[in-house]
Image (spheres, grey):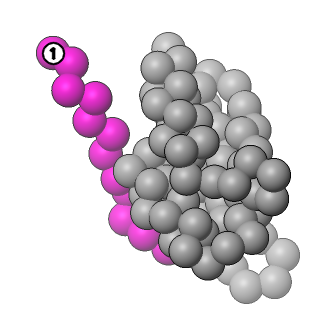
Amino acid sequence: MRNTFLVCYDICDDKRLRAVHRTMRDFGDHLQYSIFECQFTESDLLRCRHALSEIIDHRDDQVLFVDLGPSAGRGERVITAVGRAYSPIDSPCLVIDGRE
């Protein structure tokens, strides 16, 4: 079962920020500068947390995982905005875990 997560990050160093962004592109859809929407199984979530923990400085940086609940039955993504209208930044990305 997959849950939808918002992954939000605050990274204090530009080099680590770029690395976190590149890593997150492998896991979800880029919504805003430091926010991704991801559909995670438990193992996907563990892999993402592990990948990010290898990049960030645990004393200065922060990554938040906001669990929005099960992905199934959620229907279409509903995102509203105040100010500029929301438009997807990147095309969707696929997560390939190598299992058959």
Q: Is residue 45 left or right of residue 27?
A: right
> Does any portion of residue 41 appear in the rendered image?
no
**In the picture shown, does residue 96 fall above or below 58?**
above
**In the picture shown, does residue 30 fall above or below 59?**
below
Task: Estimate the x, y position of residue 81 in percent, counting from the top left.
Answer: 77, 70
Identity of the residue furthest to the bottom in this view: 84
Residue for point 49% across, 41% down: 51
Q: Secondary structure at mark 1?
A: loop
Q: Which residue is mark 1?
A: 100
Task: Estimate the x, y position of residue 87 in percent, counting from the top left.
Answer: 56, 74
Q: Is residue 50 left or right of residue 79?
A: left
**In the picture shown, does residue 99 fall above or below 61?**
above
Q: Which residues are magenta?
A: 89-100
**Foreground pick, 53 / 9:** 53
Magenta stretch: includes residue 93? yes
Q: Is residue 59 left or right of residue 55?
A: right
Magenta stretch: includes residue 92? yes
Chief secondary structure of the magenta portion: loop
- Image quadrant holding the C terminus, namely top left
Q: Quadrant of residue 53?
A: top right
**Foreground pick, 8 / 94:** 8
Residue for point 50% across, 14% down: 1
Task: Estimate the x, y position of residue 59 in percent, counting from the top left.
Answer: 81, 52
> Does any portion of residue 47 appear in the rendered image?
yes
Residue for point 66% across, 60% down: 35
Residue for point 38% across, 50% down: 26
- The three-letter code of the residue at mark 1 reads Glu
